[in-house]
Amino acid sequence: MTSPSDLAALAALLADETRAAICLALLDGRAWTAGELAAYAGVAPSTATGHLHRLVDGGLLVQRRQGRHRYVQLADPSVAQLLEDLSARIEPRPAPPRGLRAATASAALRRGRTCYDHLAGRLGVAVTDAMTERGLLDQSAGFALTPAGSAWLADVLGWDPAQPRPSRRPLVRGCLDWTERRQHLGGLAGAKLCETFLGNGWVVRIGSGRAVRLTTSGRVMLRDQLAISLD
Amino acid sequence: MTSPSDLAALAALLADETRAAICLALLDGRAWTAGELAAYAGVAPSTATGHLHRLVDGGLLVQRRQGRHRYVQLADPSVAQLLEDLSARIEPRPAPPRGLRAATASAALRRGRTCYDHLAGRLGVAVTDAMTERGLLDQSAGFALTPAGSAWLADVLGWDPAQPRPSRRPLVRGCLDWTERRQHLGGLAGAKLCETFLGNGWVVRIGSGRAVRLTTSGRVMLRDQLAISLD
DNA sequence: GCGACGGTTCGGCTCGTACCGAACGATTGT
DNA sequence: ACAATCGTTCGGTACGAGCCGAACCGTCGC
């Protein structure tokens, strides 16, 4: 039997508005830095540090230290599920997907979609994996572009990641996908990649949602450049 | 999008040890009185009143006033589900039921089982409904035995509910069953009924768990006395 | 090496809230 | 009508927890 104090301790982790904001932000699957979360939640960095400690100790978050940065992420998909269950109780869902049309849309989303401004779904994961295998991306300690990867991006995208950037946004960043349970490429490079894929007609949006479909020319490009063959 | 303050407010309801104890107690599906919950949680009645107000306002609990009593219950099965999801994160489940043996046991539990000391499952609900239909039980305002119901119990059980009782336990009490989503008969009368069913061999326990099986003599008795026919 | 930057620790302030006891309704049964 | 019981309201206390600023530590880039 679960003890009341254990349940209360778990609930207390989410019972603070700042911690709730942090968890909801992390629900996008990305790994955020402590400073980003502090700014997002509108509290001082020192305050955020304390909250992150509690959330990590409580098992809701995991952290990864990388240089002077501390990246933080939801611990596992079940945490995301829990947060979504709680959210559902606040605002009931429109309706569970029913019927052939909805099932088709759902399958399309699993195949490929955009996550904010970069590629996700099986397509996003496949591209990320292929880049890693071909030495373009280093996933051993977080995400980092190799020199070959920078060159490849410059070649494919006509955009050189080594150029000085106006934005403070990280060049590459891991983004966890809850349906695939795999990391895919986010960050500035991920956004540029997605932009190019759409701009060159390698993928097209299905309707007005986030789902995307790989085109024939896109399939050719992936096969030639990254030796990827998707259904 | 869910706002952080809404999520925090919901979590805060469970973030107090006393409120958590109350919710876990109510997870048995029964309707408890405010005083019982106060004693169970080990706080003063005035303190419990405040907590119950918060839980009802927050939508986790519903209340029903009956005389000078205030009965309180989980608002709906989804609340029970949420509590169980949270508990599961504290102590991971042994394993989901797999295999024929487990599926059979699961089905047996759905058919008939004991809930603490009274009958639940489809059997418990069927008995309760039959008693209501035959004017033995009044469910219009909570649960109450009709005079005819008292006589029937005295006849069937050889136990007169009208006799002065040593126990302070309520004579009858509604008990919500999450799998059936229906109320069944709890309280002292429910316990006596269950005791008689077991003592007369109308139902027998399956193995050492809570599942029970209706015997042939039990089937006859239900048909004759309450016009119930179960598979 | 030295500054810049991200993150952490510590001290101190403030506010929320859980708690109880006592007094006060409301209901039931004698 | 009266007493007993269940529940509620109110006032007052105390403890916990969130917040910030300042000082400090480790990493990165020049």
Image: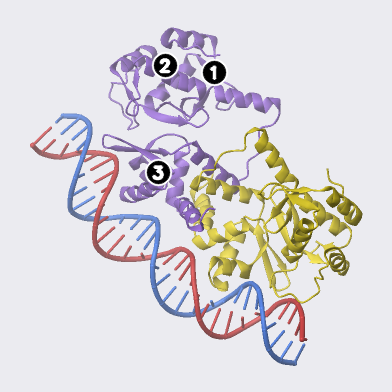
Chain colours: A purple, B yellow, C red, D blue
Q: Which mark is residue A195?
A: none
Q: Residue at x 63, y 44 (%)?
A: A92
SS class of the residue under badge 3?
Answer: helix
- Which amino acid type corresponds to the residue marked 3 in the rendered image? Tyr
| Residue that carries the numbered disc 2 in the rendered image | A130
Relative side of C10 to B148, left or right: left
First in residue order: circle 2 vs circle 1: 2
Same chain, labels 3 and 2 = yes
Residue B183 is drawn in which quadrant? bottom right
| Residue that carries the numbered disc 1 in the rendered image | A204
Relative side of B174 to A27, left or right: right
SS class of the residue under badge 2?
Answer: helix
Q: Chain of mark 2?
A: A
First in residue order: circle 3 vs circle 1: 3
Instruction: Give the answer, above or below, for where A206 lies relative to B216.
Output: above
> Closest to the observer: B212 or C2?
B212
- Which amino acid type corresponds to the residue marked 2 in the rendered image? Ala
Q: Chain of mark 1?
A: A
First in residue order: circle 3 vs circle 2: 3
